[in-house]
Amino acid sequence: MQIPLEDFYEDIIGKAMRGRHISEGELSEKTGIDRDTLGRICRGEFSDESALPKIAAQLGLDPGALMISASKSWLPRSVSLEGLLQFNTAYRDMRVNAFLIWDPASKEAAAFDTGTNVDDMIAEVADRGLTLKYIFLTHTHNDHVADLERLKAAAPGARVYANRLEPWPGAESFVEGASFPLGSMTIDTRTTSGHSEGGTTYVINGLARPVAVVGDALFAGSMGGGMVSFADALRNNREKIMTLPDDTVICPGHGPLTSIAEEKRHNPFFPELS
């Protein structure tokens, strides 16, 4: 089953407004859109196509991609890749992802976050005869580490890692650029902070396509909110994620899998790439 998008145009506009510290009143004044119409747009009540390009221009967004988001006409292509599984679990009124990646030859595996329930992940490790070597944290927000203790108990030999900028009890720390072997594969680390203090993107090479597990740095057609720094989040995404090869599979913390090529065309936050 296709996992729905995490964000639509109203979420994207809201994140850009908050990140750039622009109020509805200021945006109304800058765009010439009356407050009532703008309020409806910001609530997701799409009513005026002519308004979106004006909003996009003021918020540094791509107007075409924002229009596609408003039309709800795009979903990324589904991904089937040997050595990669996605787990999608409920957290309050939303859903969160965790991932399992393994070397098909050696059967060594790494988990990325836990979501809220690791039962299915534990079952897949057993059914496929995998050895869980690592548990990597993209960041330490509760929805991403909620079932960490159970995963550790199920795989007592697995080493847990978190970025030194965002330490976690019981996890070993690493600095950006650290690389980890997984069978014949490699896992490289890039700090993509902004949503969190030490948000990390893990770039995995050795499967049929490169893979980037990005946490809440980037979503299909959107990005995580700049809870620490919107400017840093946007810069890190541009410099450390969007520069990856076009065929890179993006594994986000919420929503469906996507690819760099699709994000260049459909993500409003990167108008320079569309």
Image (tube, grey):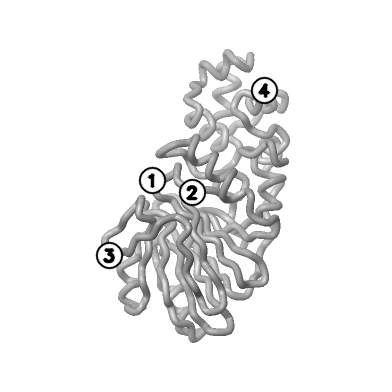
Which mark is nearer the camera, 1 or 4? 1
The first of marks 2 and 3 along the sequence is 3
Task: Mark 3 vs mark 4: give the one in front.
Answer: 3
Q: Residue at x 62, y 75 (%)?
A: 82
Amino acid, disc 2: Thr
Residue type, label 3: Gly
Residue under pointer 2: 192
Q: Secondary structure at mark 1?
A: loop
Q: CA distance from mark 2 to mark 1?
A: 9 Å
Which labelled disc corresponds to residue 260? none
* Between marks 4 and 2 in the image, the one whose residue lies nearer the viewer: 2
On-image quarter of the C terminus = top right
- Residue 144 rendering spot, x and y as whole percentages: 40, 57
Give the CA separation, mark 2 to mark 3.
Answer: 22 Å
Badge 4 vs badge 2, beta-carbon distance below 8 Å: no
Whole-percent x and y of residue 115?
42, 61
Name the amino acid, label 1.
Answer: Glu
Identify the amino acid type marked 4: Lys
Is residue 187 positioned above or below 177 on the image? below
Whether tag 3 and tag 4 are in contact, CB under 8 A, the answer is no
On screen, residue 49 versus residue 1, left or right, reads: right
Per the image, label 2 sits on a secondary structure element best described as: loop
> In percent of the image, x 61 and y 38: which residue is there?
269
Taking the image as shown, residue 80 lies to the left or right of residue 218, namely: right
User: Where residue 170 is drawn, which disc sits there?
Assistant: 3
Q: Quadrant of residue 145?
A: bottom left
Q: Which residue is label 1 attached to?
A: 197
Q: Is residue 208 above or below residue 36?
A: below
Which of marks 4 and 3 precedes in the sequence?
4
